[in-house]
Amino acid sequence: MANLPFVIDGCGEPAAVRIEVYSGSSDGGSLDAVAYACADHPEPAADAITAAGFTAAAAASVPGVERKCGDVHVFATGTLATDWPLHPRWCDRSGCPQRGEHRSRVTDVDTNRSEASILTVGLVQTTHPAAEPVVALTATVSTTAHRVVLSIGQARVLRYRLSALTDATKYRQR
């Protein structure tokens, strides 16, 4: 359990209500934490969360999970995590200091068919505080790998260009 940057006064009684804490809205924001309240304190807890600029959403309690009123669980991937300034939200959090860079999980560009090259893509950012994330695209042909690093702006434009090109293959001239 951890303390959020706002106070949820709990009485220590068994929790009856689970409150999800979001930065942004509950339908599109980041789930950052879960707060617990007894039957007498859900409103003060929700008010404290809202007053701090977060969104509070009541959620079903998890069977077998016992918490006390005032307990808070902060998710490591949320914006309230204690290592948030050290790791971007998308970072896989393994070996960053040794590599000198944050990395997301690598995603294969897999069509489930035999292809001439193997493509993977992921986010990378050096550990310098002022560094911007980039998209790393790696193409492997036979035993040779080539890495292309794109700025976020280049990746966004490439997405649109690829979309236009693939859309063009849907229409045939008559």
Image (tube, grey):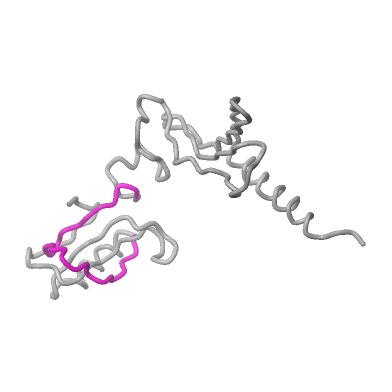
Instruction: From the viewer's side, name the closer residue of 155 and 8.
Output: 155
Number of numbered discs: 0
Q: Is residue 1 left or right of residue 159?
A: left
Considering the image in quadrants, where does the C terminus appear?
bottom right
Magenta residue check for 86: no
At 29% from the left edge and 51% from the top edge, which residue is drawn? 75
- Find residue 25 and report its image quarter: bottom left
What residue sits 40% from the left and 40% below the top? 91
Picture quadrant of residue 29: bottom left
Q: Is residue 71 magenta?
A: yes
Image coordinates of residue 156 in percent, x first then y, are: 63, 46
Residue extending farthest right: 174
Rendered position, 132 above or below 164: above
**Is 18 located above or below residue 99 in the figure?**
below
Residue at x 25% of width, y 68% of height: 46
Q: Position of residue 7 (x, y in %)?
A: 19, 58
Q: Nearer the viewer, residue 104 or 151?
A: 104
Q: Is residue 82 left or right of residue 143?
A: left
Which of 144/83 is in front?
144
Residue most extreme to the bottom = 39
The kind of secondary structure the magenta stretch mainly shows is loop
Q: Is residue 19 left or right of residue 97?
A: left
Q: What is the x, y in percent for residue 140?
A: 60, 31
Q: Is residue 84 or residue 90 the one in the foreground?
A: 90
In the image, which residues are magenta?
A: 54-77
Q: Position of residue 138 (x, y in %)?
A: 58, 33
Q: Is residue 46 above or below residue 94?
A: below
For the point 58% across and 36% down, which residue is it? 137
